[in-house]
Image: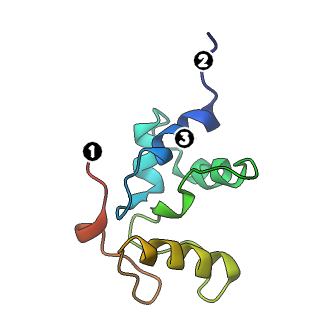
Amino acid sequence: MTEPTKDQKIWQVVAAIPPGCVASYGQIADMAGLGRQARYIGKALGKLPEGHAIPWYRVIRSNGQIAFPIGSEAYEKQAQSLREEGVLVVDGRISMKQFQWRP
């Protein structure tokens, strides 16, 4: 059996985030065993294959901010997906105190 790639480790952690919760890029990096490679998380999520079911939209900045520019198509898709799960998004921010995943 082959060892999962770095991207696959990230995808596995992101897939485990429950509905109604969010996690930061740094939290995902730490949980995937990648230490301080938070910047890589977004790149790995950008490589998700077409038709995947991984909830990429549950990953946000550590300050609770959505990383995409407000008003962009990606921002609107992420904010709407989070709202559908009951996550409150106000001015592009989510309360980490209220919604952060704590496994």
Left/right placement of residue 89 relative to residue 15 reads left
Residue that appears at 40% across and 49% down: 27
Residue 86 located left or right of residue 79: left
The residue wearing badge 1 is 103
Residue 100 x %, y %: 30, 61
At label 1, which amino acid type do we have?
Pro
- Note whether 42 is above or below 92 in the view shown: above
Query: Which residue carries the number 3 mark?
Result: 10
Q: Nearer the viewer, residue 83 or 60?
A: 83
- Say if mark 1 contacts mark 3, CB within 8 Å: no
* Residue on which disc 2 sits: 3
Q: Position of residue 87 (x, y in %)?
A: 36, 74
Distance (Cα) linking label 2 and label 1: 23 Å
Q: Nearer the viewer, residue 101 or 62?
A: 101
The way the protein has been coloured in the rendering is rainbow
Residue at 45 percent across and 32 percent down: it is 33
The numbered mark, 2 or 1, whose residue comes first in the sequence reads 2
**Which callout, 2 or 3, points at the residue further toward the start of the chain?**
2
Q: Position of residue 68 (x, y in %)?
A: 61, 75
Residue occupying image coordinates x 60% and y 51%: 53
Indicate the quadrant where residue 42 lies: bottom right
Q: Earlier in the sequence, mark 1 or mark 3?
A: 3
Q: Assign the C terminus to one quadrant of the image.
A: top left
